[in-house]
Image (tube, rainbow, N blue to C red):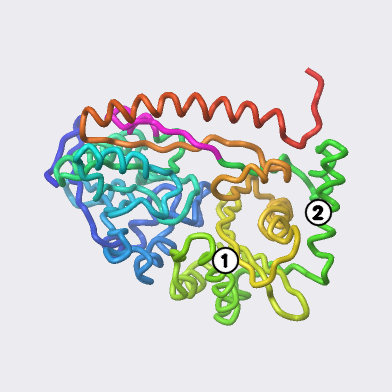
Amino acid sequence: MNGQEQGECSFVLRVCDSLSAFTPDEWNSLSGTSRKESSYNPFISQAFLSSLEESGCVSRRTGWLPQHLRLEDAEGRLLGAVPCYLKSHSQGEYVFDHGWADAFERAGGNYYPKYQASVPFTPATGPRLLHDRSLRPQAVRQALAAGLRQLTAERGVSSAHVTFLPEDELPALTGMGFLHRTDQQFHFINNGYGSYDDFLETLASRKRKALRKERREALGPGISIDWLTGSDLTEAIWDQFFAFYMDTGSRKWGRPYLNREFYSLIGERMADDILLVMAKRDGRYVAGAINFIGSDRLFGRHWGCIEDHPYLHFEVCYHQAIDFAISKGLKIVEAGAQGEHKLARGYVPVTTHSAHYIVHEGFRRAVEDYLERERHEVARLNKALQDHTPFRKTEA
């Protein structure tokens, strides 16, 4: 794209069809991308995003064509970036716009392709308008938001969507005409607990007893739990976990998004940022969940099993994640998309955010009206759910 001026700063926005357009040092200079940073998010690391590309999980064939935005100054120095994809469908996003697509196409429009600024297949909040850590973030974010809007108009696509972004990135996007959407997840908040029992002591007595019983019964059939990370993540372990993922993913989604090569790549490049919680019975693993470790939080992603046991899913995905977070001093566990069943297990409702730019004026007005009503409903539901957490009620 052509060079632009913002204040006294001249910059150029380029579109890159691969993360290889950024050197490791360049990418690691951006906010949230480096393990050395206090706000590190593993999903926007070069290791994670490049593994998706090199394994072929994201590509033109899968409907996720990389179109990353690269913001440079006049000398070619990297100022900021957006992980972005040209999409030919709405799968693997977890912010659902299928109804929008159907309505627009019934009216004679073409909803696809569209731009998606996100981490593929990953419903976890993290930076999307990435800025060089030495620069003022707001100026870079405004330039990136303006560039994404301009790119959408120039390329003739219907829309651009920035999903699971932190709330402090919203003003740059809404200031450029993006529409604000909210949704809900459930996160565990570690209030300085020394152990899982310390956490249980904050629950109402009936809820505390129910969770203790649930955990006992999950491990009752001779099942034990292993935490695997770093050098524990051998190719043999990945073979077993991938079998769980394929079995469960095929039943849930029809066609799982990730392939076996992806797991080998992340195991090679970011093993210390990964926790596998694996359940063993009679000397062999029968279920497991993959988690990613950020600077202050644990991100639960997906699980799989080859044997069904009561409560094992809750133990492997939710209780063990709390155990690990408390043991490592992590502040938050993000347990993925949806799932009000997490509430009874100590996870509380949290609002998530996305931003959407719709080119067609009439359609944009219709979506804007819908989103206003949806935001009120999400806020109402979150407030209602806060009243149904398992924690002891305190006197006002």
Q: Quadrant of residue 189?
A: top right
Q: Quadrant of residue 12?
A: top left
- In percent of width and height, residue 92 lies at 42, 55
**Label 1 neighbourhood size at 10 Å, few (<14), some (14-19), many (20+)?**
some
294 horizontally vs 209: left or right: left
The correct choice, above or below, for 76 with respect to 96 in the image is below
Residue positioned 73% across, 42% down in the render: 344
Residue positioned 31% across, 42% down in the render: 102
Q: Which residue is mark 2?
A: 214
The correct choice, above or below, for 203 with respect to 216 in the image is above
Instruction: Tell whether position 323 is magenta.
Output: no
The correct choice, above or below, for 43 with respect to 174 in the image is below
Q: Which residue is mark 1?
A: 248
Residue positioned 30% across, 64% down in the render: 59
- In percent of width and height, residue 114 lies at 26, 47
Q: Secondary structure at mark 1?
A: helix
Magenta segment range?
Answer: 170-184
- The residue mark sitting in front, 2 or 1, is 1
- In percent of width and height, residue 45 lies at 43, 58
Mark found first going from the N terminus, 2 or 1? 2
Q: What amino acid is labelled 2 in the image? A: Glu
8 horizontally vs 39: left or right: left
Q: Mark 2 touching mark 1, by CB under 8 A?
A: no
**Label 2 neighbourhood size at 10 Å, few (<14), some (14-19), many (20+)?**
some
Query: Nearest the camera: 362 or 266?
Result: 362
- In percent of width and height, residue 136 lies at 35, 36
The correct choice, above or below, for 393 with respect to 137 in the image is above
